Image (cartoon, rainbow, N blue to C red):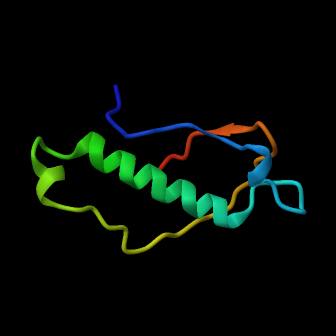
């Protein structure tokens, strides 16, 4: 059993750009949302009151398109 953190994102109409798939800026927002959720899920009790998690760098390899109402679960490598 894996203890990797995961959460699901679903593309809404406002996420779709003129190319018909999720805009790249939305991907970065999803990364930030996942980062914050991971921090609160993985931090030791009390750490969230004392420390702040900061993402210093994002790197995205686009491996396909997500279209309206498409769901995905990003998986870190």
Residue 65 seen from this side? no
Please count the marks in the image: 0
- Residue drawn at 31 percent across, 67 percent down: 54
Percent position (x, y) of residue 16?
Answer: 80, 54
- Residue drawn at 49 percent across, 38 percent down: 7
- Residue closest to the far bottom: 56
- Residue drawn at 45 percent across, 39 percent down: 6
- Residue drawn at 57 percent across, 40 percent down: 73
Percent position (x, y) of residue 5?
Answer: 38, 40
- With respect to residue 23, does 39 lie above or below? above
Relative placement, left or right, of 19 versus 3 is: right
- Residue closest to the far top: 1
Residue situated in front as seen by the camera: 4 or 17: 17
Relative placement, left or right, of 3 versus 13 is: left
Percent position (x, y) of residue 72?
Answer: 63, 40
Percent position (x, y) of residue 19?
Answer: 89, 61
- With respect to residue 6, does 48 lie above or below? below
Relative placement, left or right, of 42 versus 59 is: left
Residue 72 seen from this side? yes
Tell me the quarter of the image containing the N terminus. top left
């Amino acid at each position: 059993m894996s203890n990797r953190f995961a959460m699901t994102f679903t593309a809404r109409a406002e996420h779709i750009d003129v190319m018909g798939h999720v805009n790249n800026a939305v991907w970065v927002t999803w990364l930030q949302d996942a980062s914050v959720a991971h921090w609160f899920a993985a931090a030791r009790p009390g750490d969230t009151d004392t420390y702040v998690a900061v993402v210093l760098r994002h790197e995205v390899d686009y491996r396909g398109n997500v279209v309206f109402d498409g769901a995905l679960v990003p998986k870190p490598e």
